[in-house]
Image (cartoon, rainbow, N blue to C red):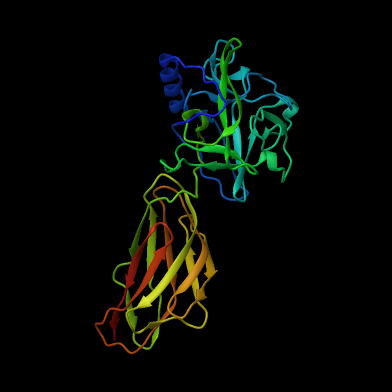
Amino acid sequence: MQRTGFRRVGVPAVLCTATAGLMLGALAAPAAQADDGESSGPVKIYNKGSGGYLGVYDDNPNENHEVRSLVGGRYWSAEEHPGRAAHDWVVTRVGDYHTLRLTKTKDAKPLCLTAKSGAVMNSAIILSPCQDGRASQQWSLKAPESGEGDWLSIRPRNGQDMAIGTFKREEHWGAYDKLSLNRANESSDRLWKVPGVSDESAPGQAEIKGEPNQTARNDSFAKPAVTVTNTGRSRIAKRTVTLTPGPAGVSFPGVVELRVKRPDGTSQTVRCTDTGTKAVCNDVPLGIGPGQTTRLDTDVRISGLKQGEIPSLGYDVDRLGRAKSEMRVVG
């Protein structure tokens, strides 16, 4: 990968391996993915290149404290002396972005990860008092094009071509890397592991299946359904779902609504637009993490068909796939 404007200092292989192993052990039980307005954490966030924790080497950090990637040290090692460093973060979703709040600060003051100079190349990364709506404290967490959301770049809201990266190794009773904004790319020094958070704009992977053994009666309404199971590693939030009846004998009622039953038992109805040949349902809140399943169904009218015929409704879920929900006409 091409690096721009930074000098990377090599990381000893033994240190990287040992540190990364400890990090993975500490993160074996990821936090739950946060929905809009909710938080996950506290979590430890670490850098792919060095294995260092995102944090500060101070047991009582205050505002304007520089945030670093803490690789390890005699006095503030995350494992040996957890009380001498602050490296636990609460990650909160704010619309399409996230805020990162440090849990351990002076006088318990809420301090958030901040681009000191805003979305400006080479801006330092510091702590500052958390403020709702402050763009320099809102970050998008983006997966590289080659990945599916396990490693994320941390990009300022108003500078999506930039990302937080390491650029200079220093020693102060241990090793740490200084941080700043640089050009966003897939370089390992600009990728981070954020437990409980994935890039929901990544395509994702899912299995979409029509529910088995569905039946319908002629000249009546039916509720063809499908299930959407997340088979990938990234959470799937909202998607556009397109409904296509066919081949014959299936039509929409005057108002098309898609019902969504999420894995937590909650349900929601989405109003769809009937184009005449299909219905388009925007921003359908699937809300499924890896291994979870959401059920979708809607009302259709069955007419002009004979017993034993098998009409269907096609479900096309944006960037995930499609499936037919088939029904056998009975009675």
Q: Is residue 97 above or below residue 100?
A: below
- Residue 110's spot in the image, x, y percent? 71, 34
Q: Residue at x 74, y 41 (%)?
A: 131
- Position of the N terminus by quadrant: top left
Q: Is residue 203 above or below residue 250?
A: above
Q: Residue at x 50, y 68 (%)?
A: 281
Q: Quadrant of residue 173?
A: top right
- Residue 6's spot in the image, x, y percent? 56, 24
- For this rendering, which residue is in front, 156 or 83? 156
Q: Is residue 75 left or right of residue 331?
A: right
Number of labels in the image equals 0
- Residue 191's spot in the image, x, y percent? 50, 33
Q: Residue at x 70, y 27 (%)?
A: 105
- For this rendering, which residue is in front, 13 or 260? 13
Q: Residue at x 34, y 87 (%)?
A: 218
- Position of the C terminus by quadrant: bottom left
Q: Is residue 103 above or below residue 221?
A: above
- Residue 302's spot in the image, x, y percent? 37, 84
Q: Is residue 205 above or below residue 313?
A: above
Residue situated furthest left in the rendering:
308
Q: Is residue 81 left or right of residue 307?
A: right
Q: Is residue 67 left or right of residue 15?
A: right
